[in-house]
Every structure is written in structure tokens, then in C-alpha cells.
Amino acid sequence: MKKLVLFALSLLFASSPVAPLRTLSFARESVEVTIYNQNFALIKDQRYLEFEKGINKIEFKDVAALIEPTSVHFVSVTSPASCNILEQNYEYDLVNAGKLLFKYIDKKIKVVTKEGDVYEGTLLSYDEGQLVIQTSNGLAMVARPDNIKQIAFDKLPEGLITKPTLIWLIESKSRNKQLTEVSYLTNGINWYCEYVTVLDKDDKNLDLDGWVSIDNRCGATYEDAKLKLIAGEVKRAQGEARYRDDRMVLAKESSAPQFEEKAFFEYHMYTLQRTTTLKDNQTKQVSLLNAAGVPIKKEFIFDPSKGGYRWRYYSDNNETLKEKIRVELEFVNSKNNNLGMPLPKGKVKVYKKDADGSLQFIGEDAIDHTPKDEKLRLYIGDAFDIIGERKRMAFKQEDKTFTEAYEITLRNHKEEDVDVIILEKMWRYTNWDIVSSSANWQKKDASTIEYIAKVPKNGEAKVTYMVKYWW
């Protein structure tokens, strides 16, 4: 059966005319780049090709160096049924000095040294230290690399290429011009979002600017590309990644919002409403959104459990635990708050103007992908002038029960009153009850209660409670 298949293929190639190798040099009709925030992109490149009737062998250059060869798809947009793809190859044996020398063993070369000596003859061998050349005057050993000024080769050897190249063997039913589309996945293109916010003087509102940063390290430049960005975690099978570590150039574009957002499958797609050029080894920034006057809540949070092991140690030894008071900003991603666009994950930098009107950096946090109408919380630092302490005041163990009492002390050295949220963890057992408390509290989850303590300026506030555990 195999012999029959091979015989049939040989008849196909014998009977079909093969057009000469034709390098694809036609200008792109259009190119679309869809970038995922997982360091890969989908490229869709449309070009017009002129096919001869029969079998055409076509080279397609200007593809990404980090292309995934098995993802390549070729189709005729004009007439899909008229083209039959017989073979597809990805050539990446790129030319370099070592490969040139290897290909020219037993071939003629010309070497010029820095002193002006010329050696012309057949290259017999080479290594890092020298070239061995058979000249008309005998055998010559020429030191390299510091001694050599120039090596001249007759032509580029067959099989070596200057750029990664896709090669197709395509059978066309007629001689005509067709619009074709080549699509492929490539690694080395990534995008991420960064946000810059500015608080007003009263810490009641903020202005938010979102910037998309695009890193192109894939080895190709895409001019006047249609750009789409996918936000979300797309499942991909694990494979070997290829990376380049090149210096990047930063390009920044207008601060006016330029993206249209739409839901796409279980993700979100952001489409740039114009074309843009993505140069190789370049980082480009494009404005995603601008929102002014977003209402926020600034909150002070005392959470002793953030101390980890120290929290339990100090409790069990009746020692006073000091823990930082966290400063957090909360706002809602809603249209009423001048937002409402699904926000891609990214870092958020927070600034505020000082008394001189100069912007000063006051903190940074990261957000996850956030749908519309959801809350966002930014932990931007710890309060300097508010002190929180926690101490166990009593402990009693009886048959299948524990009872313990705690005192939380908050001291405010600011020139204004503050509200501090106190979070207490009921960590000993799943069955518990607050048997006494000096203030109202709210159960937040199965093991957490919350107090809101009003602490006067230059004063202090205390909260005490007793909890009983049983099993």
C-alpha cells in the first residue's frame, strides 16, 4: 500500500508543472495582531499573490522569529477551493559567520588581514583560532579573529537564510491573482496594563488613567497593524518557550482613550480604533481610559492576624502585639463613578499633590481582572500617626471550652478624628460566640468579626471583648 501511495505522489509531481521558486515580496494588504496577556499573539497577515497554474513554491519572509510553526494556517481568501497546500516548511537556519565558514569548506574564499595581506584559495578547515587555506602558493594558516579584517564569500550558500521563512508547496488550479491570509501564533509579544491615579486634597476622589504597554520581542515588525488585546486567562498546553533578551525602545502614544471594549467568549477584547506600528524590540504605550472624579473611600484597617506567627505567640503569652495600620482605598468600577469598563489586571500607582502643587508618589498596588460594577481595593501603605495594639487580658479553660478576653488599643496622633476598622479572627475552634463586648461588632465570615472604632484626634480608643469556644 505504501509503495502505491509513493507511486501516486511521484506521478502527481511528474505530471504537474512546478513554477520556479518565488520569493514573496508583495506588500501586505493588511495585518492584524491579537495579543494575549500571556506573552503570545495571533498574527493574521493578508497579501495578494499571483499563482501559476500547477505547483507553486512560495517563500514567505518577515515572520516572527518566535513563531510556533505548528500553528501556521494558509488560506486563499479569494478562492479557497482553487489552492491545495501540498507541503509547508518553516526554515530557521539563519546565516552567521560560523555557518558561512562551514558551508564554504572545500570552496574558494578571500581573506584580508589587518596588515593588508591577502589570502585567496580553498578553505580546508577552521576553528576559533585560525583558518586553514590552500592557496596557489601553498598551505596558509591565518590567525583569527583579531587578525582578520575581511572574509569575502562568492555568494550566500544554499540552505542558509537571513530571516525566518515559511515555505509552501501549493497546487493552483489556475493562473490568477488571489488574496491570501497567513495566520500563526508567536511567542514574545506581551501586553499589560498600568494605571496612574491622583488623589484630590481631601482624599475623597481620584483621577485614573489606564495605559496599555505592549512589549514586542518576537523578531518581527508589524506596520499599520490592526491591534486587538485579549484580557483573561486562556488555557494553553505547556511547551518549550523561546525567549529573546534584547534592549527595548519605549514609544508612547496619545493619552486620549482609543480602545473599544467588548465581551469575547469568556474573556474581554479591547480593539484599538486605528492602526499602529509594532516595531521589533520596542515597548509601546497606548492610552486605555481616562476617568476623572472617581469617588473613593479611604480606610484605616487594623488586622493583627497579618502578623502571622507573632499574632498567636503574643496572644498565648499575654504580651502586647503592635501591628501596622493599613491604609486602603476603595472604589467601585461603575458608570456612576465615571468608570464601568472591565479593567484588565495591572499595577496601580497612586500620587497626590503636596502643598507646593507637585505630585508625590504615595503608594502602589496591583488589581486583578475586574468586571464592571465590582469593588476595587488598593493597599497603598501603612499609617504613620495611628498606632494599634492588641493584648490578651484573660484566659480560662474548662471541660471542652475556652474563654479568653482581648483589649485593642488605638492611638491617633493626627489632627483629625479617624475611623479604624478592626478585624479579629476567631481561630481556635469553629464553634465560638462573643459573650461580651464593649462595642457593636459585625460577623464578616465564619471566623472574622469587625469593629469600627472612632478614634479622636490626638486621643485613643479601646475595644474589649470576650469570646467563648467549645467543641
Image: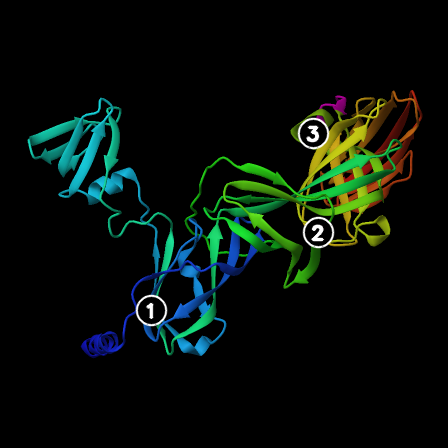
The residue identified by callout 1 is 56
* Mark 3 and mark 1: Cα distance apart in space: 70 Å
Look at discs 2 and 1 and give the one toward the viewer: 1
x 80%, y 41%: residue: 330
**Secondary structure of residue under mark 2:** loop
179, 226: nearer the viewer: 179
Look at discs 3 and 1 and give the one toward the viewer: 1
Q: Is residue 320 magenta?
A: yes
Looking at marks 3 and 1 on the same chain, the residue that comes earlier in the sequence is marked by 1
Examine the rendering and report whether any part of residue 131 can be seen: no
Looking at marks 2 and 3 on the same chain, the residue that comes earlier in the sequence is marked by 2
Q: Which mark is residue 307?
A: 3
Q: Amino acid at mark 2?
A: Gln
Q: Which residues are magenta?
A: 316-322
Q: Quadrant of the C terminus?
A: top right
Q: Which mark is residue 258?
A: 2
Q: Position of residue 288 (x, y in %)?
A: 70, 48
Q: Position of residue 77 (x, y in %)?
A: 50, 71
